[in-house]
Amino acid sequence: MLDNIFLEALAAVIEEGGFDKAALKLNISQSAVSQRIRNFEEQLGRVLVVRSTPPEPTEDGRKLIKHLRTIRLMEHELGDSMGFNPSGEFVTLPVGVNADSLASWFLDALEDFLKEHNVLLDLYVDDENRTHEMLRRGEVVGCVGTGARSVKGCRSDYLATFDYLCLATPDFCERWFKDGFNHETVEKAPAAVFNRKDETQSQMLAKVFPGETVTHPIFYVPSTESFVDIICRELAYGMVPEFQVEDKLKSGQLVEVVPQGRVPVSLYWHSWNVDTELLEGLRRTLIQYFKRRK
């Protein structure tokens, strides 16, 4: 049998990002946390935590944390159904989401659900192409990501498809793309890219210049709000989801630089295939949100 005291210590070290912070959460000493992890590792005969900064779980550690999170969900649901959960008690769901979704529709979609069920979200933000990895490692119970194929032991549901547009101000276009969007102009004009994992800029260039290699100056902006601001300040052009800047497109503040370079991004909700009302309710809420928007 797995000891929940050891499991909670392991999860706290990883979730809080350190032994000292885990001690504060568990209201015990740091040495007691370390002792529990050592005892757990000795009991199982394997290393569970890489003592890095911050600590990282080994593959076995991830499996155990996922097991604990599943137990938490099922125990909370059982308590609700039998009426012995303390009134107003919250349950925390770790969820992966991409920055663009978080900055736009995600909280709108879940607001009523979160209030109704006393749910807190522990949000992990990454590129939409990489949130699946957090789900695979057991760090989150669900994630917004691309690709219909589900992770082993999980399910996936289609949400919506958004077009990412190559945008700039009219004055930026006049300065940098007066002679058109071609190799010569693209190699000189600064482009905003969210981070080094962001692939929409390279996908756009691959559509406009198929089979060719194009290099250009890059302005890295790992903030959804600042990303659009950089473009509006005429410091760069970049790929932005259409729904995020509809007002700026209508007013003419931003214009589409190269319409043939639109990049459609389909989003899916991926989640553990665990039979709990909370996860199922979260899934239904997200799906219904986009059905109402059609």
Image (cartoon, grey):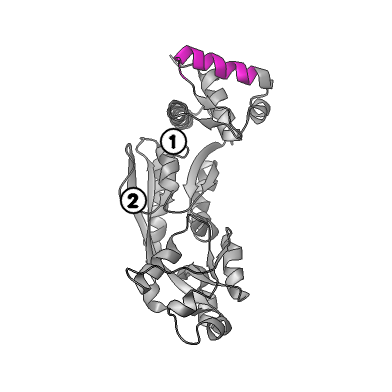
Give me the residue at 47% from left, 58% from top: 198
Residue toward you, 101 or 232:
232
In the image, is 187 to the left or to the right of 148? right
Give residue 10's quadrant in the image. Answer: top right
Question: Outermost residue toward the left?
Answer: 149
> What's the amino acid at mark 1?
Gly
Q: Residue 227: percent from the left, percent from the top?
A: 57, 65
- Helix, strand or loop for disc 2: strand
Is residue 171 toward the left or the right of residue 27 in the image? left
Task: In this rendered view, identify the residue nearer to me: 191 or 144.
Answer: 191
Answer with left or right where residue 61 lies relative to residue 120: left
**Location of residue 138 in the rendering, given as x and y in whole percent from the top left corner:** 44, 35
Q: Is residue 49 above or below residue 249?
A: above
Between the C-alphas of marks 2 and 1, the distance is 19 Å
Q: Where, quadrant-wise, is the C terminus in this rendering?
A: bottom left
C-beta proximity under 8 Å, tags 2 and 1: no
Q: Quadrant of the N terminus?
A: top left
Q: Is residue 34 magenta?
A: yes
The label number, if any, that marks residue 157 in the structure image:
2
In the rendered structure, which disc, 2 or 1, sits on the residue that comes first in sequence?
Answer: 1
Whether residue 28 can be seen here = no
Nearest to the observer: residue 112 or residue 212: 212
Numbered label attached to residue 174: none
Expressed as whole percent of the image width and height from the top left, the position of residue 77 reads 45, 32
Vertical placement of residue 48 versus 171, above or below: above
Number of numbered discs on residues: 2
Toward the viewer: 59 or 145?
A: 59
Which percent across, then down, holds residue 244? 51, 68
Which numbered disc, 2 or 1, marks the residue closer to the eye? 1
Which segment did they paint magenta?
32-46
* Circle 2 crowding by C-alpha within 10 Å: few under 14, some 14–19, many from 20: some
